[in-house]
Amino acid sequence: MKEIKTLYIIGNGFDLHHDIPSSYYDYMHWLKCIYPELAEEIERTFEGANQDSWWSDFECHLAKIDCAYDISILIYPDFEVDGIQLKGTNSPDRLAALYKAIQKTFTMWVSGLNDSLPAVHPDLPIDSDAAFLTFNYTDTLQEVYHIPDSQILHIHGNVRRGEEVIIGHNSTGDYYPEKQYEMVDFKNAPFDVAKEITAFRKPTTKIIETHRKWFESLKEVEQITVCGFSFSDVDKPYVQEILRSISKGSKWIIYIHSLWDFMRMTDKCEELLIDYDFMDW
């Protein structure tokens, strides 16, 4: 295998930089147009989901079930999302169905994002000999920058290849029963709900093990360029695995586009003990 000297970590900001409507806000607006009942269900199930700011950390917030969920479930309407039934009579089952509906509609939405690519023009100095770890589901690297599939790891799936689109939070759901007991003396239902919350946790450990050889191939990497990746807590295990895999003297170059971005990324890099420089885009 050819030694890899440069690694790119590509996040959703990369697609947004190229004017691809790939934000969680875009998914929200798509839902409200195509599946308004599901959008309403999300708003009444998750804490703060009726606010735009909730969608900025969409995956993490998928664990934050409203503490009144087991009570208000009794008056929720029944409805269907593309063959997935959401019944108002059993809250754990309804939550499991809701997570399935989110997974399915999210996949449907991202499947349409590649339609934007013919109008996209490359404007970043990308090293075509590098390796690429992308958290995006699109083919921007392939179609716009002509990077071969063999150099790209779509860590959460690629829609063109029909791979599973992986989303999820990083919570065990342990907090939920405690919140419920603070509100009312439930017996078993809170633990059932917590089980469903845990089931939608992103399987980062399993994903890393699946791609163990790829991570091991990074031992000669000298430079990591980060484009549009937010270093979210959900995806932190991947960064930690990269840090374990690469040489200690590797340099990180991180693209930023605002003062808020600068402050947030500085905190993330210092937390992870990363030797970094910033670059504007």
Image (cartoon, rainbow, N blue to C red):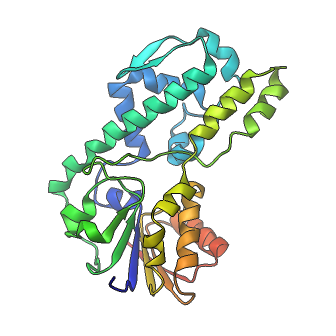
Residue lying furthest bottom: 249
Q: Residue 178: x, y in percent?
A: 81, 33
Q: Residue 18: x, y in percent?
A: 28, 60
Q: Does 161 sit left or right of 195 as displayed?
A: left
**Count of number-bearing discs:** 0
- Note whether residue 249 is visible: yes
The image quadrant that residue 184 belongs to is top right
Q: Residue at coordinates 34% horizontally, 82% vertically from top-left?
A: 1
Q: Residue at coordinates 49% horizontally, 57% vertically from top-left?
A: 207
- Note whether residue 42 is visible: no
Residue 24 versus residue 187: which sits nearer the camera?
A: 187
Residue 210 versus residue 263: which sits nearer the camera?
A: 210
Residue 14 versus residue 164: which sits nearer the camera?
A: 164
Compared with 277, 68 (above or below) is above
Q: Residue 7: x, y in percent?
A: 40, 77
Q: Does 140 sit left or right of 168 as displayed?
A: left
Compared with 55, 281 (above or below) is below
Q: Residue 112: x, y in percent?
A: 25, 42
Quarter of the picture containing the C terminus is bottom left
